[in-house]
Image (cartoon, rainbow, N blue to C red):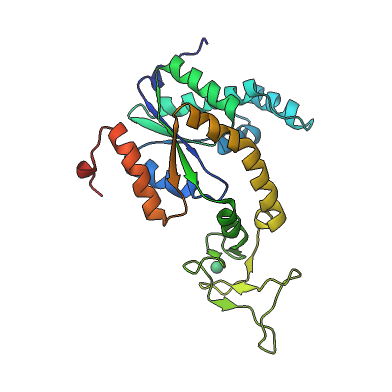
Amino acid sequence: MSNHSPALKDKLLFPFVAPPNGGKGTQTQILSERYHLPTFDMGSTFRAILKEGKDPELKAELESYMNNGKLVPINTVVKVFQKGFEALAENHPEAKGFILDGFPRNNEQADALLTLCQTWGATLSKAIYLNVSLDVVRTRATGRRFCSENARHVYNVNDERLAPKRQKLNESGQPVTDAQGRILWLCDIDQAELIIRADDEPQTVDKRLLEYEKETNPLIALLKEKALLAEINGEQAPEKVTQAIEQLIQPLLGLTAASQGN
Ligand SMILES: [Zn+2]
């Protein structure tokens, strides 16, 4: 370990673990803003290296595996994480801590993170695990609809709070369905047709959830065994989930419930 990043000394790291559509994005965004905890996002770090080409050497290394249909080996994954995360920390010397999104994803990565924390002198908080049953995340994902005119108009036909109000009707005033028999809906704001993204098609969602389970169940078990897991009921209302996470992180940040201004 040659690369000691002083930027991470005494910083708190908060890893988040949740199934896809488990509410991780919403929660990390709220907490990141409220507690000034910059978020390191492994997925977008990978995409940035592959797209922007800021790090040609690392890009070539990643592509040498991915273009041959091989899994990126752990050492390379850790290199991507370490480089990206240390750069983030150096840009935010004022932050007390950082949120980790998408790392660690499996046991090898968790072991690497523990070693890196020792090297940095950083403190690893318990991983915040948003426990949401796969049935619930499946329902969330497959109900999602995007406006065909403005992708920021997002709905969910499986959630009454987010459901669109108007169905698409044919000339005789009958609801129109797609090839799978699903009702077509219209955007409340601009009446454009709502679409289902390929990512939210049931078979794609099921594949993603199976992969998640296969990778994450051992990680959850390992973190539990090391007393590094804080399980939060992710099926509660989002505000309740936020509160539960706050109870956990406030003492670590030296805050008490009473001193929080929100
Ligand atoms: Zn719209």
Percent x, y for residue 17?
51, 39
Along the viewing direction, whichever of 65 and 23 lies nearer the viewer: 23
At 57% across and 47% down in the image, what residue appears? Answer: 20
Outermost residue, right side: 68
Up/down of 208 relative to 253, above or below: below
As drawn, 207 above or below 38 = below
Q: Quadrant of residue 181?
A: bottom right
107 vs 258: above or below? above
Tally the numbered discs.
0
| Percent of width and height locating residue 164 | 54, 72
Q: Residue at x 65, y 38 (%)?
A: 214
In the rendered image, is residue 48 in sight? Answer: no
For residue 63, side relative to residue 250 (left or right): right
Compared across the picture, whether 18 is left or right of 11 comes to right
Residue at coordinates 20% horizontally, 44% vertically from top-left? 258
Point out the residue furthest to the top here. 2
Percent across and percent down for residue 218 are 59, 33
Q: Residue furthest bottom?
A: 172
In the foreground, 254 or 44:
254
Residue extending farthest to the left is 258
Left or right: where 121 falls relative to 156: left
Q: Quadrant of residue 190?
A: bottom right
**Front one among 177 and 45:** 177
The answer to whether 230 is drawn above or below residue 205 in the figure is above
User: Quarter of the picture for ligand 1?
Assistant: bottom right
Residue 112 seen in this snapshot: yes
